[in-house]
Image (cartoon, rainbow, N blue to C red):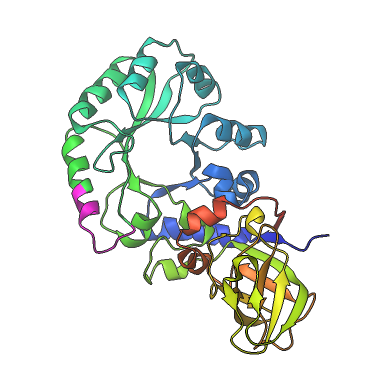
Amino acid sequence: MRPARALIDLQALRHNYRLARELTGARALAVLKADAYGHGAVRCAQALEAEADGFAVACIEEALQLRAAGIVAPILLLEGFFEASELALIAEHDFWCAVHSLWQVEAIERTPLGQPLNLWLKLDSGMHRVGLQPRDYRSAHERLLASGKVGKIVLMSHFARADELDCASTTDQVAVFEAARQGLAGEVSLRNSPAVLGWPDVPGEWVRPGIMLYGATPFEVPQAQAAKLQPVMTLESKVICVQELATGEPVGYGARFVTGQPSRVGVVAMGYADGYPRLAPTGTPVWVAGKLSRIVGRVSMDMLSVDLTDVPEAGVGSPVELWGKRVPASDVAQAAGTIPYQIFCNLRRVPLSYT
């Protein structure tokens, strides 16, 4: 069988969830959207259900998958509902639901429901993606309460630049939020992963750890709390071929790499069809046979090449870690000009193995 696989360390997942709780003293919704950032939403939910305060997903399809797997903990729909017809299912399955637009408020007002909803009222405090405008926030809150269809309202917003530790945008967004919610009763949820790790003074009874659950830092610079995270996914494969090349020999499509000395080059069963970033350049770190090495040449659909010149013990069958406990996913992402969120979510074809 093809040796490419992703090992998922569920104990590391639990460690990272506990860290979010410890750093904030708040209740935490474990964010499992996009199939738990490629880690497998059902298995991750099962691993956390005994201690998680709840989960968060993007949409009702993801939430229904968790309910079908037997997950009974609270589940928040971060994008809310897309059509009023979904409200019946939301009430039936007792999903918590974000409300970010006036049309959603109107839909709740006019839709008969069998039981009250737990709503998370989202303010656009400066990101300008989704969220009610500050001028509409109080009236939306009042309308939802007056509808008689609401059991609880949590006040929420989302940060645009919390991963930039020296940027005043987060403080500015908190100020906008505090002004908009003045006089409104309700628990607060503001902090995503970077805010959990890097903004300890942001208020709130609820936090929403996402990327930190999976052990990847959201920051581009070292950060003390992020250093405590444990990688959850190890993407691994094996060397399937070794080439002995003279000086001046090209490697891979487009001859993007040419040997500068007599070299040993290993071919690894891993490519962009598996989700490894195609734009990862020569020099991207990789762990081969117990030593740090580098990728050389262009990543192919099913294979990539690694430099074995200084790893003489490596050969056909040698283990390769593409990212994980020895090669941080953030280092691979940065080399490829992207973020760990994307390389996790892009994972495909590779079987997941849980420990």
In terms of depth relative to the viewer, which is nearer, 254 or 192? 254
The region drawn magenta spans: 163-172
Residue 320 visible? The answer is yes
Q: Is 165 included in the stretch rendered in magenta?
A: yes
State whether residue 355 appears in this view: no
Residue 259 appears at what percent x and percent y?
A: 61, 82
Above or below, 35 relative to 220: above
Relative image position of residue 16 (x, y in whole percent): 50, 60
Residue at 49%, 14% (x, y): give it: 114
- Vertical side of 1 occupied by 293: above or below: below
Residue 291's spot in the image, x, y percent?
63, 83
Q: Quadrant of the C terminus?
A: bottom right
Tell me the quarter of the image containing the N terminus. bottom right
- Give residue 315's quadrant in the image: bottom right
In this orientation, which residue lies closer to the viewer: 7 or 30? 7
Residue occupying image coordinates x 51% and y 36%: 74
Provide the major secondary structure of the magenta segment: loop
Using the rendered view, name the quadrant where residue 320 is placed: bottom right
Q: Nearer the viewer, residue 148 or 265?
A: 265
Please report the residue visible at 55 percent of the width from the left and 43 percent of the height from the top.
34
Q: Is residue 178 magenta?
A: no
Give left or right: position of 125 versus 26.
left
What residue is shown at x 22% (from left), y 41% (from top)? 177
Q: How many marks?
A: 0
Q: Position of residue 338 (x, y in %)?
A: 46, 59
In the rendered view, does 180 fall on the left or right side of 314? Answer: left
